[in-house]
Image (spheres, helix red, strand yellow):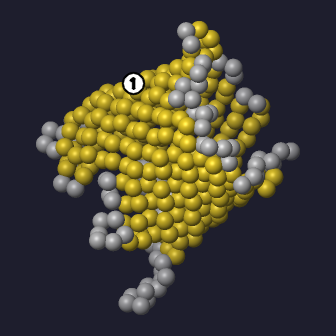
Amino acid sequence: MIAINKQVLASRESGDSDAYNRAGGLDFTYRPTDSLDIRGLWARTFEADVSGQNNALYLGSSWRNKDFRLEGSYTDIDENFNPEVGFIRRKGVRRINAQMRYSPRLGKFGIRQIYTGPAFDFILNQDNQLETREITLTNYFRFENGSYIGILPKQTKERLDEDFEIRPGIIIPQGEYSFNEMMIRGSTDDTKALAGRVSVNFGNFYNGKRWGFTVNAGFKPNGRFGIEPLFQFNRVTLPRDTFNASIFGARMGYSFSTTLFAKVFAQWSSDNNVISTNFLLNYIYRPGSDFFLVFNQIYDTNGAKTDLLDSTVVAKMTYWWNP
């Protein structure tokens, strides 16, 4: 269960203190067997002068055995669902996701295990009209030395009911688009004290093309501390315009004990010149039951100085009930 209240304090100029954004919800996980789990979530937001169409619903399940894994989920987000203390990519949509994995242990040619299978992602509007369809074929090869390589071709179909301003002054016209992309990922053994990961992507993008790469590393000098810097770059070429998008980030974690953990994440995006920071404290007060304390801040770097845009503190408690 979670409940959040974001209240705007009265200003000296306007005296308006009626603006607020509140959210509440319940989530659960049910595991009737070792191979099957069922997950669910319901949430609602509350704002002044907004009523109706403000719910979010999620239901998912996964089943696995030694070689196979099946997973599916359904998400329904109303048009007026607006969790300001959080982030959702799209509102007013229904999403259906399904994944299948076959992961046999090969034990030949230096390959320890193969992970392969399709993933389907369908996004519909509230009238059940298809807006986005993505089909990805996942192929990962885990080697005996702990490293892996992944090859992920993806086919996307997108329908735009209106012009999409992807950047200020850069418009993708309304219409239906179908395009293909390829992503290749690789990593060294992530159980080592020093590990590296890289991915490259290239292909079509709406009526243009896109290519990019992501590089990140992991440094874990001991069992308590770890840090992971990250850099991501994408270049988009459209018929009339070209632009770049970059992200710099890093995450750091520290284990005080087997039941108390702290994590810090910071990220800067060239897309909006915003720095986002996140601090999370996780305390396991009993097996399967957690207390989380989260502190978020967002800074604007567009001006001559860095300005604080938003601060949020959230606490959440989970309880594992095993009758």
Q: Is residue 163 above or below residue 192?
A: below
Q: Residue at x 30, y 47 (%)?
A: 245
Q: Residue at x 47, y 34 (%)?
A: 197
Residue 294 location, quadrant: bottom right
Image side of residue 301 versus residue 277, left or right = left
Q: Is residue 17 above or below residue 276?
A: below
Residue 28: x and y, percent? 69, 48
Image side of residue 122 versus residue 61, left or right = left
Q: Nearer the viewer, residue 114 or 168?
A: 114
Q: Is residue 29 above or below residue 207?
A: below
Residue 25: x and y, percent? 62, 58
In the image, farthest residue toward the front: 221
Residue 190: x and y, percent? 58, 33
Q: Residue at x 53, y 67 (%)?
A: 312
**Circle 1 sits on which residue?**
153
Residue 261 visible, this orientation = yes
Q: Is residue 200 above or below residue 52?
A: above
Residue 74: x and y, percent? 54, 40
Q: Quadrant of the N terminus?
A: bottom right
Q: Nearer the viewer, residue 188 or 207?
A: 188
Q: Quadrant of the C terminus?
A: top right
Q: Nearer the viewer, residue 69 or 113?
A: 113
Q: Residue at x 64, y 56 (%)?
A: 262
